[in-house]
Image (tube, coloured by chain):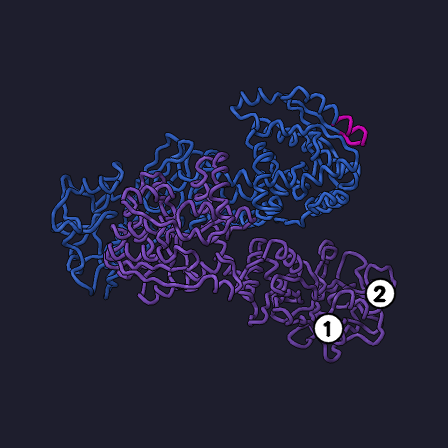
Chain colours: A purple, B blue
Amino acid sequence: MYHDLPPADPSPAGCETLPKQVAALLAQWTAAPAAPLVVGVSGGPDSLALLHALWQGGYPAGLLIAAHLNHAIRPAAAADAQFVAETCAAWGIPCHVGQVDVPALQQARGLSLEEAARLARYQFLAQVARQVGAAGVAVGHNADDQAETVLMHFLRGAGLAGLRGMQPQSPLPGAPEIPLLRPLLYTGRDTIEAYCLAHGLTPVQDSSNQDVTLFRNRLRHELLPLLGEYSPQLRQRLGHTARLLAADYELLTALRDEAWSQVLLAETADWLQVDLAGWRALPLSLRRSTLRQAVWRLRSSLRDVGFEPVEQARRVAEDGPAGTQASLPGGLVLTVGYTEWVLAQPGRSFTPAGPQIAQPRPLPVPGRAALVNGWQITAEWLPQVDWAAVRGNRDPFVAYLSPEQVAGLHVRGRRPGERFQPLGLAGHSAKVKEVMINRRIPAGLRARWPVVAHEGHIVWLVGCMIDERAKLPRPGPAVWLRCQLAGGRSASAKP
Amino acid sequence: MYHDLPPADPSPAGCETLPKQVAALLAQWTAAPAAPLVVGVSGGPDSLALLHALWQGGYPAGLLIAAHLNHAIRPAAAADAQFVAETCAAWGIPCHVGQVDVPALQQARGLSLEEAARLARYQFLAQVARQVGAAGVAVGHNADDQAETVLMHFLRGAGLAGLRGMQPQSPLPGAPEIPLLRPLLYTGRDTIEAYCLAHGLTPVQDSSNQDVTLFRNRLRHELLPLLGEYSPQLRQRLGHTARLLAADYELLTALRDEAWSQVLLAETADWLQVDLAGWRALPLSLRRSTLRQAVWRLRSSLRDVGFEPVEQARRVAEDGPAGTQASLPGGLVLTVGYTEWVLAQPGRSFTPAGPQIAQPRPLPVPGRAALVNGWQITAEWLPQVDWAAVRGNRDPFVAYLSPEQVAGLHVRGRRPGERFQPLGLAGHSAKVKEVMINRRIPAGLRARWPVVAHEGHIVWLVGCMIDERAKLPRPGPAVWLRCQLAGGRSASAKP
């Protein structure tokens, strides 16, 4: 359940009530206020004020646990760790101090310094939280950090997931069963600094500054003050935007998960298969988000998955005939099949399953002919055809035939060198094999690919087009054929 | 149906193919390409390039109609109108020229100059489009205009509706049956200028600049170039954001409309009534959007409806007891009732309907007692009570009573000066009338407000609390009472 919260008093004067505000937020969030709360403390103003406010009544006495990670990046790091440990000792708060060689981690994992420090910090917080059986982990991100985050995502051209910024409650990265709490997310830096001053706190220069990129520092010190000239109270406004979009994102994510469970046909570590008609019927927003979900399922990451590759893959999946492919980041390949699309890891090539015929079979009208693997062709009489439906038919697995072409209809495979007269070529003939190649029917499927014919000639090359001689001469009665997976979901209903 | 479109070539070189791109977009959008297309032409680079590209093959010959409105703001306005008329004459395109005194309209309607010019322009375009039976109206907004629009909304703290920017297709303001089309929305200003140069077009200084605010001009000339230093290709990135959010917004709007039709109970021009339990069960995103919808229904505008007033009203509607009120912009007042909330125009005060009793009636256990207006109180035996449900009961219209208090139960109104012992006051007594006032039961409903009593004393002041003497002494059997509208939707199911 998503909780949206009343804003903390954004004025520095609000610092008087900070412990009460923090207590109110935590009471709203934490299901188990009798369990310990781990507080990530760098020693900077935000985390020090948070720890103090919690100690001053924000959380039940005796249940606070501080956790400080020495990143070993800056020379002053050891002094910071000592300051945090001494402060906690003076306040009677147990303090876990960890140390990690972030530059080494950075090299080993091929990360940026910022990413490595973040990873190490959350790993350490999760470890302490599990050790003490914590109800959650609290960190000191404030309303200015939030505005910077939202602005950074905006400049990168983000969607909702980025523009909603940080969440007041979210799963702890790497330990999703533990909630990560941000009780100061609605409190400005000015209020926090006033709080430190009012309570004689002497924070170290926030060591989290050491691992923020130059980009974020430029946003903070150059760009945000300048934007404030265009938009007074920009921090509050971006905070409002984040809160509105967070709720929208939550609802859309729930809808995406529901849609995903409906369209996903099968999944392994190497590939996943999505129902084509069901996916194509989703609204655009969910076609995009389920496609990103598919990438995420196979890569466990959406890193470097930008706008254009997803859009190109989406268009292929929406409109592409069977056999069409699109590349996605990480070497993933999307292949359109006849009733599904498949996303596969690099090198895991995929041949779409399609209709195949083993032995020739009669096709009674009305009636059906069974193919292999559950496919079938059904035939029906339409006493009066809807001419607009005939002209508008875009489904190559549906055909409207002249009622004069039904004697002796049967389904079989193509014959060597066989030709027919594709619709629209004014009676010119073409090789069945070449049409199949043009229409991208996979090589492995062509030999047993079904055609519908009578004694004279082919009337329908399934999945491609009908023969010119079998087309409906005029509005009136017609024969309606469909090739589909029996029990499969099909986009084309009977007219 | 929402169409998302392939991007135009964003490089100036793309100007070669502009007529084809425009033709492709229009073919995708316009259901009736045999009908005229009205093109709003200021004479500036965007609209002149658009008209030229349409004339050069973007739209069927003979169906283009130019429309130019002389805003009569600048001295050069008459010369601009003459330039557009002469250009159209040279190209053989019919041109409608209108004139409106925008400063006068501005004064008469109390608008800004920008708003008045925009209103006059769309009124004129709608008038021409209706006159010629147009399939749509095309205007020249480009990808840079889009980036400015998205940035402007971002700085104002917008939600999805603003951040999605302008739409490639939208209803023409004031004439929603006519589509407003923006075929250049994915084409940058640089491409358009290159196109003008390549085709010897000599646009006037775009007269739409005259009605853009200083704010937008500062964004264009100062802020966007600066932001480009932080984010290369910012125009494309903001365009991507707009396209992603537009699809999200479209889906959320459909969900809002669906939710609205489910929770709306009644509506007049003066007030509307929303099902309380149904509305409270909606996701946060939809609670917000339906509340804004309610304001929009009564005001036909969301002007000046900021974040905070809606959030405050939302919290009142979510948690407030019956009778609680919240103010919204335009003097609208939201009042929480017992089974609904009501939003009313200023001065249209609203007294929530509630349970009322005409004559005393017995309340058998199990059984029911009918009140007036369809309300009733039902009584049941619970053989074994769920103690957590008793403690967790937040619904004042549900009560758990001691099984020793059921002899002679009946429902009646309060007696003059009557007292009882409210639960939790350690046996201290209080006046029924004063408790009703504290619990905000409207004055007009108090006299006939139901209480459940036996011969000794009140056991339940409906909608408020039970009597201390009637509380469950221990886990075990209990009597469960509920007061509700018969057939009404209730949030509290029987445990």
Q: Are marks 1 and 2 in contact (CB under 8 Å)?
A: no
Taking B411 as reference, is B139 above or below it? above
Kind of residue at disc 2: Gln
Local secondary structure at mark 1: loop
> Residue B393 vs residue A265: left or right?
left
Task: Tell me if mark 2 has few (under 14), some (14-19) or many (20+) residues whose alpha carbon lies within 10 angstroms of its own.
Answer: many
Residue B196, compared with residue A352, is above or below; it is: above
In this view, A364 is above or below B312: below
Query: Of circles 1 and 2, which is in front?
Result: 2
Residue bearing mark 2: A421
Q: Quadrant of the C terminus of chain A?
A: bottom right
The residue most toward the bottom is A359
Which of pointers 1 and 2 lies earlier in the amino acid sequence?
1
Please report the bounds of the magenta region as a residue range.
B84-94
Label 1 marks which chain's residue?
A: A
Q: Amino acid at mark 1?
A: Pro
Percent x, y of residue B407: 15, 57
Q: Quadrant of residue B197?
A: top right
User: Residue B85: within the magenta?
Assistant: yes
Q: Is residue A200 left or right of residue A292?
A: left
Name the secondary structure under disc 2: loop
Instruction: Give the labeled residue for mark 1.
Output: A364
- Note whether residue A455 is visible: yes
| Extreme-right residue of the structure | A428
Q: Residue at 58%, 56% (x, y): give it.
A: A288
Residue drawn at x 65%, y 71% as measured from the top left: A347
Dot 1 crowding, Cα within 10 Å, few <14, some 14–19, many 20+: some
- Quadrant of the drawing holding the N terminus of chain A: bottom left
Query: Looking at the picture, how far across and down is residue B306, in whole percent?
Result: 44, 37
Q: Nearer the viewer, residue B307 or B76?
A: B76
